[in-house]
Amino acid sequence: MTNLPINGADTAWVLASAALVLLMTPALSLFYGGLVRTKSTLNMMMMSFAAIGVGTIVWILWGYSLAFAPDTGQGLIGDLTHVGLNGTLNTVVGAQGSEIPTLAFVMFQMTFAIITVALLSGAIADRAKFGAWVVFIVVWLTLIYAPVAHWAFAAQGGSGGWIIDKLGALDFAGGTVVEINSGAAALALAIVLGRREGFKRDAMRPHNIPFILLGAGLLWFGWFGFNAGSALAAGHLASVAMINTQIATAAAAMSWIAYERVRNGKPTTLGVASGAIAGAVAITPSCGFVTPLGALVIGLVGGVASAYAVSLKYRWNYDDSLDVVGIHGVGGFVGMIGIGLLASKAANSAGGDGLFISGNPDLLFKQVIAATTVAAFSFIGTWIIATVISRTIGFRVSRDQEMTGLDTVEHAESAYDL
Amino acid sequence: MTNLPINGADTAWVLASAALVLLMTPALSLFYGGLVRTKSTLNMMMMSFAAIGVGTIVWILWGYSLAFAPDTGQGLIGDLTHVGLNGTLNTVVGAQGSEIPTLAFVMFQMTFAIITVALLSGAIADRAKFGAWVVFIVVWLTLIYAPVAHWAFAAQGGSGGWIIDKLGALDFAGGTVVEINSGAAALALAIVLGRREGFKRDAMRPHNIPFILLGAGLLWFGWFGFNAGSALAAGHLASVAMINTQIATAAAAMSWIAYERVRNGKPTTLGVASGAIAGAVAITPSCGFVTPLGALVIGLVGGVASAYAVSLKYRWNYDDSLDVVGIHGVGGFVGMIGIGLLASKAANSAGGDGLFISGNPDLLFKQVIAATTVAAFSFIGTWIIATVISRTIGFRVSRDQEMTGLDTVEHAESAYDL
Amino acid sequence: MTNLPINGADTAWVLASAALVLLMTPALSLFYGGLVRTKSTLNMMMMSFAAIGVGTIVWILWGYSLAFAPDTGQGLIGDLTHVGLNGTLNTVVGAQGSEIPTLAFVMFQMTFAIITVALLSGAIADRAKFGAWVVFIVVWLTLIYAPVAHWAFAAQGGSGGWIIDKLGALDFAGGTVVEINSGAAALALAIVLGRREGFKRDAMRPHNIPFILLGAGLLWFGWFGFNAGSALAAGHLASVAMINTQIATAAAAMSWIAYERVRNGKPTTLGVASGAIAGAVAITPSCGFVTPLGALVIGLVGGVASAYAVSLKYRWNYDDSLDVVGIHGVGGFVGMIGIGLLASKAANSAGGDGLFISGNPDLLFKQVIAATTVAAFSFIGTWIIATVISRTIGFRVSRDQEMTGLDTVEHAESAYDL
Amino acid sequence: MKLITAVVKPQRVHAIKDALHEAGISGITVTQVDGFGRQKGHTEVYRGASVTVDFVAKSKLEILVSDGDVKRITDVIVASANTGSIGDGKIWVTAVEEVIRVRTSERGDAAI
Amino acid sequence: MKLITAVVKPQRVHAIKDALHEAGISGITVTQVDGFGRQKGHTEVYRGASVTVDFVAKSKLEILVSDGDVKRITDVIVASANTGSIGDGKIWVTAVEEVIRVRTSERGDAAI
Amino acid sequence: MKLITAVVKPQRVHAIKDALHEAGISGITVTQVDGFGRQKGHTEVYRGASVTVDFVAKSKLEILVSDGDVKRITDVIVASANTGSIGDGKIWVTAVEEVIRVRTSERGDAAI
Ligand SMILES: Nc1ncnc2c1ncn2[C@@H]1O[C@H](COP(=O)(O)OP(=O)(O)O)[C@@H](O)[C@H]1O
Ligand SMILES: Nc1ncnc2c1ncn2[C@@H]1O[C@H](COP(=O)(O)OP(=O)(O)O)[C@@H](O)[C@H]1O
Ligand SMILES: Nc1ncnc2c1ncn2[C@@H]1O[C@H](COP(=O)(O)OP(=O)(O)O)[C@@H](O)[C@H]1O
């Protein structure tokens, strides 16, 4: 079989980006691992690594096909053409002149699926059975992630996913697919599994904040692949996406700690790390559609919104342990709505103009529909999946095991022996 | 001197890949550093950094020339044309249309030499004199690594290295040069240096498992440069190599812990990290020759094979402290033989068809010859080198120093002061 | 607006490089964080993250314009054309055939500004008010960094920055802008803030040396983007810059520990990490102008020079706590003067020939002028800025707060809860 | 004056501290210790090699009290430390000849 | 023989050690402990949630001395540990029935 | 009842524990401590600056025993802790007035 011609520069950029995004999941494992108490550090990290391991297999066997194979007709799901990566060798995808090998695209998208499910583990820190988590990954990627990815990412000339091809809402790098999806699913998981022993009573200090900062630094680094790589080409669009990512991430890190400074008196390192993530989340859907100054606004707002949102769990009594809802859910909404307000064709002529640019609320409206539909679907779907797992094989360890800590209980290991 | 024209996209990819592979050695130092006890953490990491420092100098002064300069005639070694990187400025290497600057290639290959020798340090953890290790690096890279790299990597239109140009065995990214070579050499080193004080008696728990996981994550990331970069071009082949790397690494991480779950009752985080490395090792020679489903098989087998193999040292009483033999040696064989069985021209028309694809055992036969020859050469050569060092300057610290720990003894430092 | 055409390969390389350089600041935070005592680890890391956050905002609002907008006439500073990144969307910069999007260049240069100011924090470890540090970042980037970057980096066909366009001194990747600038500024800061409680009296051991090594490893990795990315194209020049970076970094790591071995009896891990940074610093200005063997010499000298220089603070009684002066200041001078001696048109025909190559001291002379002028400007300017901050809002915490440690005092956090 | 030493489960320290506080004790010195006793440790597995961690993490509390308070305070500790399961720990009492408060040089009961 | 136990501020340990050394004491055993007392801990904040760290890090020194040295040595410790601020710590003295040096099996005052 | 306290080299703890076990002792409480004594620490070097680490890591064992067991048990410890080199450590014995097992409230020898 002859290889179809590709654009080498774009391929180089997408391959590099795929490597960067893959790194984000180990980075997340460090970020999450540092946030929990010593006794379940390894379990926390292991949940991310399981997402990589299991997610990869699911993706190549059927996940990619469900998400990106030709639509079955209603814009809801792909067909089984590419099961087992059938038909992806030596073929290409992408706009004319900007083709890349299909496998580069499969790889790049795989890393998105992996990190999205890994993010969810933050909601159920310290208390989930590892075996149940593995089962959850398989089911969730199949029933929730693949369809949502299809909706928002599978552009097939008008007959692909309903969000991108029919509704016409804009989501550059996964504000719906990754962020709102993970935020909503995390809320469902946190509710179904219930609160940790000692929630609101015991001090649950992060056990290793340098790990959190390093994790955040590596996530920041990887996010350039995530966002700028989503241009699928090395050019102007990737450049604007990259600098917007930098700006919003930096701005949110600063606005989070400014908010903390006012509210609690001190800017914290955990705040700077959390703010960075919140900003990167908020700019994820919007990085390819707004100008740098638009990104600055989205970042500043995203940081404060999430800094505020992470306290709600104490008020509303759900134990979203590592704040997936407050950071990814809320940040995702900020980004999607930010597009509706601030998108500008000056940044991307193939994008749109938001309310503040054109005075026209059309785009905003579409953004809200996309965001809320994904949130609702993901919340309900995840709630059902988690409930079924809970009632069958059980999703939570016993109270005693939880007190002892998951590292010895689930993995027969201790994180440190200093 | 005018610069010869190059392919910018391919150059960009190879430069990025070289950076990725260089990162693997600090990543390895973290992986290895976390595996040992606190008292020799720094020494463990230092051995890797010495490999970078000394390896770089050896490589530019004579290593590159021995490996890649024109063959001296028998397919065994390169000549001295490029000593001191003579004749490498502003010249190019690579297939027509896909040329890259020679220095990019020199740099990329240098990172392979560095990590290969760094890997060996795992076999002699906690007990080697640092000065002797530095001497060993120089000698081993010269007498063992450079020839083997020449054999398998120096394609010179039929008159280059014997494995690639005469035998015609396939090794995409270093299953022989890096993996089997390091595994066999590690076994020789472990035997010559002897067992650690307390081997099989004392509990030698890894002192920092989060470091191990982070190291594994960074190695995984860097391995994309290692394997996909070995295509030396940003195109279809790099893409298939990258996704195969991802698939096998993920699959082996999962198959290792599945095996552990059955044998010991629990899936461990050290297992997931070890399995990932084992899978990446197994796919290293094969990533550019098999289909994604082939990579899945190789990964699943590689993980279980290495999980089984790492216990052998307790039975056979050699103290390969950090399991270089069980992971790199065994994984390298799995990958080389995997090519003989599963290689498919559908993945790479310039490759071959394995036994299971074509029914023809020819390729398998060549793979076995290449693998066993390298193993034998490396084992014997390393055994001689290590023995000479032992008998002259001494390779092992005193029993007392070993008990105290190498960090204070060899480096006058302590890893932590928390 | 139509996008101006770009070179995709060069764009891919610059985008990848920008990501690499951004990663250097979190890496630095780890390097610095590991060097201090536990009680101010987070503050140390936070200073770097603040440099990212604040630096990004300053850069896009006015910093980039001051540095790279058209010169105001004397070669001293850029005008306000690009305030708020005005006029940078969809435009290009770069030589013909090698154009990249302006935003890619803005992003790449931003990462340089960030890390330069972050470096300074090493001089004032354990004792600076966080709020004052934030103010300092804004002022310093504006008044010191932006002008110096303009001088040495803003080539505008003869009418740009005075160092590059008038004097004609050579600085490939920031020996003046980043290294000498940070070294001189660090000295001023250390003097203005004064010595730490217990300087020379108390043992101030690094609290986490594995972090230092990992930080050094990531810095090394990122430095390829820093130096080879400064070619702004993926070709011969980037390749020579990359391999020179590798060679000098490795050589200096080795020469530092060889020097230590002789002076103190043991090669240390902190030495290998410090030497690597010193070598990377020394090759920063010279990487694109010397041959690989020239890089080897610069690295060997740079390592020893810095290893010697870091002890001077005890003799001269200034508390440059983490040795910014000894490593970046001294290394920067080694590199700038190294060009004057060893530069060769064989490596870069657009460069020059140094004294040892051509026998002509012309270039050396220019190099010395550039280096000393930047050092003087930076030292005096920073001294004034720091003094003003000290006398107004105060730059240093109280003696009691310093004894307690900045993490609890300034950030209400503890690094570890193991 | 007496010194009451109690080796207890770490997770009970918080409750014991509260109970002591209520009983009028404000000063306590706590040390992290490894306990060997009837309660056994656990097994860990690293690359197939089993490692027995044969101690159990415990907290040791030291409390200086006046002679008359010994019974009352040990009772408080027993009550608040008890979980009824093995490994709940031990309390022992020793005589103290002198107590000094560093800050004021007060001695005896006044220094407690 | 007596055992002098002193719970003091960690930053004073260096000075105390020097003072003791001058007073002829060369053997000391030091333990890192958490102190609860009049001196309160501090508050930390993580994502808006306040966490009270209710103990203060202290160092516990144990020193075996001959009967006749008790007063002199406790005075030395008080003098060198005192900063005049709350939390300076406590010293207590208990009787020791026997002391043995492991290396030589010496007993009593000779073993100190 | 008596409390035997032994400060020993960490690398001997395993052997001592085994020896005590054989001697019928099952309960021990171990603390990581820093020892200052005749055995000196070591020197570290950071960027050319020498740092003296003037303590040596030691383990402190505390063992409650019945009065009659003191001699036998201290002998066991001496025998198993001894390496003949400086820094082998010290053992001291103090009187204990009361021992209580938390779980059962048993007192005296029965609680040991
Ligand atoms: N004889 C002893 N001397 C010193 N400490 C002891 C002794 N016996 C028990 N301990 C301490 O008390 C802890 C609890 O004892 P253990 O025998 O496990 O349970 P229990 O107290 O319920 O019988 C042990 O972990 C150890 O720290
Ligand atoms: N009754 C006590 N028993 C044991 N330790 C005590 C007691 N009271 C105080 N301490 C120890 O002494 C330390 C200092 O005591 P604190 O009350 O804070 O200040 P001060 O000694 O100045 O009154 C405490 O942190 C604690 O470790
Ligand atoms: N007077 C003392 N009081 C308390 N602990 C002591 C005393 N003397 C020694 N020690 C402890 O015993 C340990 C060993 O003592 P050292 O003088 O080094 O050796 P040796 O016991 O062989 O004479 C010391 O590290 C210290 O922890």
Image (tube, coloured by chain):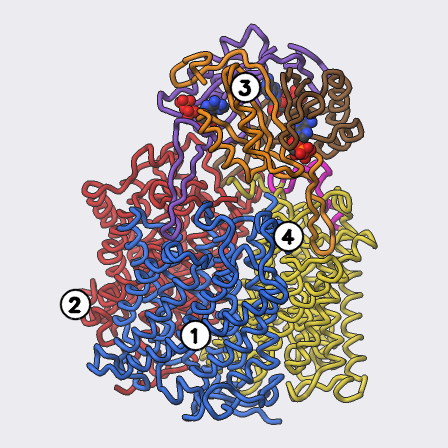
Chain colours: A red, B blue, C yellow, D purple, E brown, F orange
Labels 4 and 2 touching (C-beta < 8 A): no
- Locate residue B351 relative to residue B356 in the image: left or right: right
| Residue at image location 40% in from the left, 19% down from the top | D82
Q: Residues within 10 Å of mark 3 (few under 14, many from 20)?
A: some
Q: Give the distance between the C-alpha atoms of the residues marked 4 and 1, in whole angstroms.
A: 47 Å
- Callout 3: SS: helix
Segment colored magenta: C389-409
Q: Residues within 10 Å of mark 1 (few under 14, many from 20)?
A: many
The answer to whether dots 4 and 2 both sit on one chain is no
- Callout 4: SS: helix
Q: Chain of mark 3?
A: F
Q: Chain of mark 2?
A: A
Labels 1 and 3 touching (C-beta < 8 A): no
Nearer the N terminus, badge 1 or badge 2?
Answer: 1
Label of residue A13 in the image: 1
| Residue at image location 77% in from the left, 46% down from the top | C200
Going by the numbered disc 4, the residue's amino acid type is Val
Going by the numbered disc 3, the residue's amino acid type is Val
Above or below residue C147? Residue A93 is below
Going by the numbered disc 2, the residue's amino acid type is Thr
Residue placed under numbered mark 3 in the picture: F70
Displayed quadrant of residue C158? bottom right
Residue placed under numbered mark 4 in the picture: B409
Q: Nearer the viewer, mark 4 or mark 2?
A: 4
